[in-house]
Image: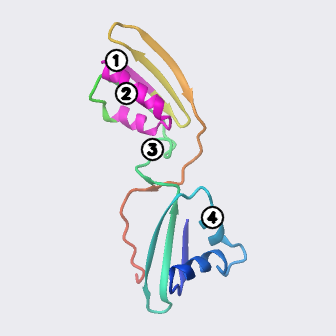
Amino acid sequence: AIAITVHPSSGEELVLNLLINDGEKSRRDRRSVLNKVFKTCGIAVGEHPVYTSVAVITLAGGFGDFTLGDLEQDAEATCTGTPISDDLQRILDSVPIDDLVEELIEELSKGSTMTLKFKPGELSVKVVDKSGGMEEYDVEWEHTPSSHAASVPVKIDPYA
């Protein structure tokens, strides 16, 4: 979501413009700024030839690289021991259960062979240890589409 306000002469005025007097019956800016989904923002303030000053606020649920869940992508990878393959690491980075990820990494550090099948909201795990013992299980978690912004630097020219 993006909120834009013109003529803010101070931080206080910027907040007042967005929250109290955004000039729209729908109060879109207020609803966006106060939406609990948005946890990160970027703010740009600058001079404007017509409006004196302008502020642009970009709101996101977070920042960083998109996970497979963010992208609504399925993935499968197999790896034996360490170092962990890039494909398996991408899956591990997409699992929102830290304790599980730590257990899986520990198992790989013992030289086990691991196959992970990822779908947004679920993970199938197959581990074969060095002695040939096998364990398989599935894990599920609540998945909601993300509102993260990509971690790509963007330059905005307000005069363009």
Residue projecting furthest to the front: 12
Which SS class for mark 3?
loop
Residues at marks 3 and 1, CA–CA distance in whole angstroms: 25 Å
- The quadrant where residue 31 appears: bottom right
Please tell me whether the stretch drawn in magenta is mainly helix, strand or loop: helix
Amino acid type at mark 4: Leu
* Residue 138 figure quarter: top right
> Which SS class for mark 4?
helix
> Disc 2 or 3, which lies upstream in sequence?
3
- Say whether residue 16 is magenta: no
Q: Which residues are magenta?
A: 87-116
The residue at which mark 3 appears reads as: 67
Q: Amino acid at mark 2?
A: Ile
Mark 4–mark 3 Cα distance, whole angstroms, equals: 25 Å
Q: Amino acid at mark 1?
A: Ser
Image position, residue 158 (x, y; %) = 42, 80
| Count of marks placed on residues | 4
* Residue position for label 2: 105
Front: mark 2 or 1: 2
Residue 104 lies in magenta, yes or no? Answer: yes
Q: Which secondary structure lies at badge 2? A: helix
